[in-house]
Image (tube, rainbow, N blue to C red):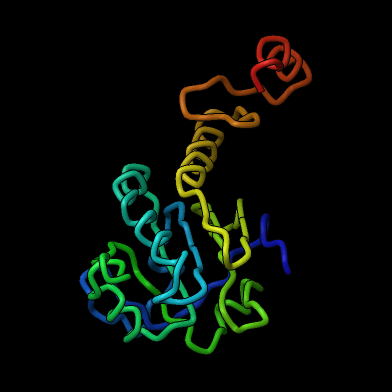
Amino acid sequence: MSVLVGKEAPDFTAVAVMPDNTFDENFNLRDYTKGKIAVLFFWPADFTFVCPSEIIAFNNRMEEFKKRNVAVVGCSVDSQFVHLTWKNTPVENGGVGNVRFPMVSDLGGDICRKYDILSPAKLAYRATFLIDQEGKVIHQIVNELSIGRNIDDLIRTIDALMFTQEHGDVCPANWKKGQEAIKPTKEGIADFLKNNAEKL
């Protein structure tokens, strides 16, 4: 499996179900996310078990992503028609409801191959890629099919990226917005550890 951190995020054009439930036959990742921090996440398949919990968790935090001007894009190997049917299925019946981010169809698995996250079963692993405003991957996490992701920690990671971009300081283990960061110098880390080592 490739590590894409530090590299340009592979671009793609594919059909996607948009938030208003229309089909965009030429959805392009780079165009949709241009100038924004972006989250591209993959799930194994629609109408499965862990997947709807993750889709709903992402959707429930869309206001948090919007506050940070972050574009969210989801993708699986299902068709656009299955995506739309899943959106139109009530949550109490295993659906995801009217989620507010594009759901890309990667029916042949080509996008998954570009990101090197296609499982032997031809399903996407639970992969998340955080992409900066220049289109570079700065964070990735890949889970086996049975383990759901922590969306709140993804938001924490976005906050750390934005803080570092704005201030130049670096963020220690378990850092959360509003907490002390580290001056990236020998003196800076020594001072931070003197005051915080026992709390880490």
In percent of width and height, residue 106 lies at 48, 82
- Corner quadrant of residue 58: bottom left
Q: Nearer the viewer, residue 183 or 84?
A: 84
Is 29 on the left or on the right of 188, as rendered?
left
Question: What is the residue that sits farthest to the bottom in this orientation?
Answer: 108
Q: Residue at x 64, y 77 (%)?
A: 119
Q: Nearer the viewer, residue 120 or 129?
A: 120
Question: What is the residue that sits farthest to the right in this orientation?
Answer: 186
Q: Is residue 146 above or below residue 182?
A: below
Count up the numbered dots. 0
Q: Residue at x 23, y 75 (%)?
A: 88
Q: Is residue 45 above or below residue 143?
A: below
In percent of width and height, residue 27 lies at 38, 77
Q: Residue at x 67, y 62 (%)?
A: 4
In percent of width and height, residue 169 lies at 61, 27
Q: Is residue 51 above or below residue 37?
A: below
Question: What is the residue that sits farthest to the front in this orientation?
Answer: 93
In percent of width and height, residue 148 lies at 52, 57
Q: Nearer the viewer, residue 149 or 68?
A: 149
Q: Residue at x 73, y 69 (%)?
A: 1
Question: Quadrant location of the C terminus?
Answer: top right
Q: Is residue 26 above or below residue 56?
A: below
